[in-house]
Image: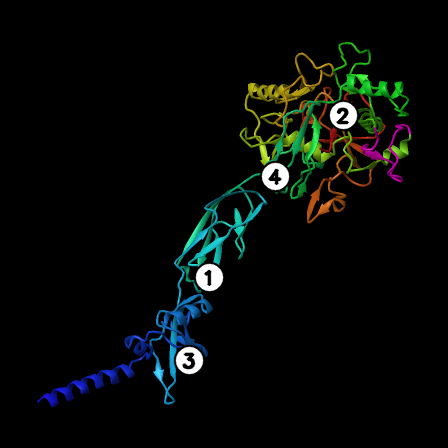
């Protein structure tokens, strides 16, 4: 009986050993026998990765691996190789071949995307500005990181396949990043606004620094104009794309006091500057009622070009920064206003920071600039708000004129328009609904500079008092300002234009004390010969900061 029990026990032990030997992973045998020091063993290893499309497993690699101790060591090593898979089924199907070697099959399950996030949930851009959003997939070793980008309104902002957002027009839009299959999504609210540029306060020298928007100024609809001709439409005409560099502009027109101080400096120091005209205090030939703080008048474009160079030398004790130079020899500074051919063909040295006339585009931008459209008297020009073309600079309403789109229905309504124009400008006649009539009391001459309200940029008398010379050439009275745009175009944008390349006249802007209100509108372009002078014509200084 004892022998039978002993035999039964031995058979049980043998059966247990046989079952252990036949297990799917013979490494477990070593573990159960509790070997004190695991030894290296070589195994044939086959690696299977899970497919993205049908979830089946495909053999991707077969090699020989050495294991020391726990099977997890092999698992961790291969997980680094297949970073976007997890070895959830490692060693699940080990087989012993006839030669006694073991084949280990490792199955790697793919790691799914669990989430997506963007580096920004809100973004503010100016029109034409761009910024690239960055998407982060979780976990970092997920298999399919493909992302699609979409915009809820491409008229406001677009987004490309790399997450680059481009602002198109003002408004709000949602930019979304979606993972493959649309399972996960992250969004960013983008607000597009106008980069209206900026203006500084008046500095100690009496200049305002004007920084135009970095974006393009353009519009398909320039709004109402006093008339259909080109002369009423300014230089920011429909579909013309314009950009300007920063510049400084005097808050007031050049006074006779400042004009004369340069002439006196020139004479006392024998500097050699020659002027065709001595200038006048304001508008009256006898000087009655005129002070040295009235704008200088009776000066030609030629006089002004030479005077700018003289003023630069007076302030800096050097001609290094003088802007206006001989077109045939840019080292020569123009000093003689009676050398008509030389001065009429003056070379504008843009790199110099001396005093100069504004270009027509600079003048108009400064006259029309508004930070916003709170007064409903501006037009959106892509990246800027500009005062309506049929208004005066700084006015909150259009001037009154025959044919305007929404005319007043009462005499009092026309008077409201008159009073608004009179708040910002010194001018002669206004439209009362039936005819052009003189103001009461009648305007009889210039006023001291800065006597009316300033415009949004902090500049006085941009409409009325005296016409102001600009640097630009102009041909016919109704000329389109785009005639020489090819000379100033960079990447399809007209950058810092300076007028047409040919033409015997120079531009005047702003109107004067002796003109109708419509001539003082910010859109009106006028022209005169560079030798012309009058009691209603002066100028304003600019320079590059």
Secondary structure type for disc 3:
strand
Label disc, if present, on residue 539 of the rendered structure = 2
Mark 4 closeness class: few <14, some 14–19, many ≥20 residues within 10 Å: many
Which residue has dot 1 on it? Answer: 145
Between label 1 and label 3, give the one nearer the viewer.
Answer: 3
Q: Are marks 3 and 2 in contact (CB under 8 Å)?
A: no
Mark 2 closeness class: few <14, some 14–19, many ≥20 residues within 10 Å: many
Q: Is residue 113 above or below residue 497?
A: below
Residue placed most toward the observer, 143 or 102: 102
Q: Is residue 110 above or below residue 2?
A: above
Q: Which residues are magenta?
A: 318-338
Which tag, 1 or 3, sits closer to the chain's start? 3
Q: Is residue 439 above or below residue 314?
A: above
Query: Which residue is outermost to the top?
Result: 288
Q: Mark 3 to mark 2: distance in Å? A: 95 Å
> At 71% across and 18% down in the image, what residue appears?
449
Q: What is the x, y in percent for residue 403?
A: 62, 30
Q: Mark 4 to mark 2: distance in Å? A: 27 Å
Residue 26 in sight in this render: yes
Which tag, 4 or 2, sits closer to the chain's start? 4
Which tag, 3 or 2, sits closer to the chain's start? 3
Label disc, if present, on residue 132 of the rendered structure = none
Which residue has dot 4 on it? Answer: 381
Residue placed most toward the observer, 14 or 164: 14
Which residue has dot 3 on it? Answer: 42
Q: Mark 1 to mark 3: distance in Å? A: 36 Å
Between label 2 and label 1, give the one nearer the viewer.
Answer: 1
Between label 3 and label 2, give the one nearer the viewer.
Answer: 3
């Amino acid at each position: 009986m004892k022998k039978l029990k002993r035999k039964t026990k031995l058979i049980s032990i043998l059966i247990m050993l046989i079952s252990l030997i036949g297990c799917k992973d013979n490494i477990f045998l070593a573990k159960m026998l509790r070997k004190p020091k695991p030894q290296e063993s070589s195994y044939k290893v086959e690696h299977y990765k899970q497919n993205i499309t049908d979830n089946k497993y495909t053999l991707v690699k077969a090699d020989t691996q050495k294991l020391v101790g726990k099977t997890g060591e092999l698992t961790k090593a291969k997980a680094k190789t297949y970073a976007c898979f997890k070895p959830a089924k490692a060693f699940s199907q080990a087989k012993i071949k006839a030669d006694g070697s073991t084949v280990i099959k490792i199955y790697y399950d793919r790691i799914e995307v669990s989430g997506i996030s963007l580096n920004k949930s809100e973004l503010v851009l100016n029109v034409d500005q761009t910024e690239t959003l960055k998407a982060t997939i979780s976990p970092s070793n997920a298999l399919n990181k493909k992302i699609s980008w979409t915009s809820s309104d491409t008229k406001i902002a677009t987004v490309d396949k790399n997450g680059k957002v481009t602002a198109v027009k003002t408004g709000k839009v949602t930019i979304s990043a979606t993972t493959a299959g649309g399972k996960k999504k992250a969004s960013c609210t983008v607000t597009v606004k106008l980069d209206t540029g900026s203006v500084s306060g008046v500095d100690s020298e009496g200049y305002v620094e004007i920084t135009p928007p970095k974006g393009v100024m353009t519009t398909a609809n320039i709004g109402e104009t006093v008339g259909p001709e080109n002369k009423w439409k300014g230089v920011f005409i429909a579909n013309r794309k314009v950009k300007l560099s920063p510049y400084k502009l005097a808050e007031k027109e050049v006074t006779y006091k400042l004009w004369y101080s340069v002439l006196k400096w020139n004479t006392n120091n024998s500097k050699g500057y020659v002027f065709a005209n001595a200038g006048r205090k304001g508008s009256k030939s006898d000087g009655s009622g005129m002070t040295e703080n009235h704008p200088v008048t009776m000066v030609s474009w030629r006089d002004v070009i030479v005077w700018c160079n003289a003023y630069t030398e007076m302030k800096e004790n050097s001609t290094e920064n003088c802007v206006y130079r001989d077109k045939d020899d840019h080292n020569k500074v123009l000093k003689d206003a009676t050398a008509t051919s030389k001065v009429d063909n003056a070379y504008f040295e843009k790199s110099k920071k001396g005093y100069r006339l504004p270009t027509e585009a600079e003048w108009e931008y400064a006259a029309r600039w508004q930070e916003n459209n709170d007064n409903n008297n501006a037009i959106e020009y892509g990246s800027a708000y500009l005062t309506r073309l049929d208004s005066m600079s700084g006015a909150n309403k259009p001037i009154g004129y025959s044919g305007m789109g929404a005319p007043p229905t009462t005499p009092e309504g026309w008077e409201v328009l008159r009073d608004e124009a009179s708040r910002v400008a010194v001018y002669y006649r206004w439209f009362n609904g039936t005819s052009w009539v003189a103001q009461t009391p009648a305007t009889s001459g210039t006023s001291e500079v800065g006597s009316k309200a300033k415009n949004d940029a902090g500049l006085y008398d941009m409409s009325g008092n005296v016409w102001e010379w600009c640097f630009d050439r102009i041909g016919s009275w109704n000329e389109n300002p785009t005639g020489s745009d090819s000379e100033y175009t960079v990447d399809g944008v007209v950058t810092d234009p300076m007028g047409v390349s040919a033409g015997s006249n120079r531009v005047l802007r702003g109107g004067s004390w002796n003109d109708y209100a419509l001539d003082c509108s910010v859109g009106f372009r006028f022209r005169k010969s560079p030798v012309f002078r009058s009691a209603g014509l002066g100028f304003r200084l600019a320079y590059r900061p």
